[in-house]
Amino acid sequence: MTDRTGVVYDLGYKPYEGERLGRGGAVRAVIKDGVRRVLGIRRKARKKVFPWMLMGIAVLPAVVFIGLAFTLSAFNPDAQSPFGGHAEYIGLVGAIVLLFVALAAPELLIPDREEGVLAVYSSRPLTARDYIAARAGALAIVVGSFMLLPNLLMYIGFAALDDRGLGAALIGNSGDLVKVLLAMAAYMVGYGAPALLISTYAKGTGPAAGTCLALIFGSTAFAEAFRRIGFPGARFGTLLSFLQHPEIVRSWVFDKPQDAAPIAAGFEPWVSAVVIALLAVLTGYLMHRRYRREL
């Protein structure tokens, strides 16, 4: 009978002794990863070009405009503004938001499925709702930042130039900031929800971005066609104009004239707000249905 011997190797493994952050820590980690991914941080240079370029386009005009107002005594912000105010500036940035979310939403969701990252997430105390909220939250943080920053610059800049003084003007114009936040929410949800929904089922980032842009821009053409059809009930087809709903809410909040297809068809502006809300609910439901099998 032979003797059996064994060898024990010390590989240096140690149990984790740090703080266990639990479910909240997992959600924060996914949000942080999402923000980095959207901005191309710690990724290849080509991944950084487009998001940072769009953010620069969104912020730079406000910086230049406020700089002119401060440096040129003859510059009258009210009369010489190239934007007309917060409403017009948000309309300008809204087009950038559409391009941004069409490219960012696929980057947030599709690589996780293609690279098998969902299996790693499922080993953490992370539910499908947590994952969806974290990815949507990361997109909202980035989009909200580059929409809010230029408007804050304009808000503070206009207040600093006001004859009433900075403090009095900030308080007196606080209603403008509330309107800015409401309009921002309409754009973020109105464009972000379709982009996230398409990215939930698409199999490639490029096709997902193209489909999102085609859907949103194409929906306006369909809405205009329904606007001109004379049979009863055709006007409800104008509600398919996903591109125009955030614009309608923005004009409604700032009390600006409107000529969008749903308005021309006889719908009140609040209907566009309801459509955006319903689209968000539908997106959340379908995303949860899709991801609850894997998380």
Image: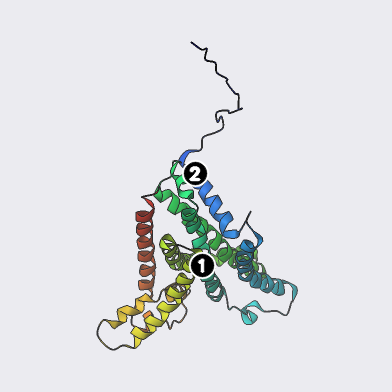
Q: Residue at x 48, y 43 (%)?
A: 24
x then y, percent, for residue 248: 43, 75
Query: What x and y, as percent, mark residue 124?
Result: 46, 41
In the picture, the disc for residue 26 is 2
Q: Could one spot residue 91 in this view of the protein? A: yes
- When asked about the image quadrant of residue 61, the answer is bottom right
Label 1, label 2: how far apart the Cα atoms are: 28 Å
Dot 1 amino acid type: Gly
Q: Residue at x 39, y 69 (%)?
A: 273
- Tag 2's secondary structure? helix
Residue on which disc 1 sits: 206
User: Circle 1: is it few (<14), some (14-19), or many (20+) Cα within 10 Å?
Assistant: few
**Mark 1 or mark 2: whose residue is earlier in sequence:** 2
Q: Position of residue 289 (x, y in %)?
A: 34, 55
Q: Secondary structure at mark 1?
A: helix
Q: Is residue 188 above or below residue 263?
A: above
Residue ID at (47%, 38%)? 22
Nearest to the observer: residue 118 or residue 104: 118
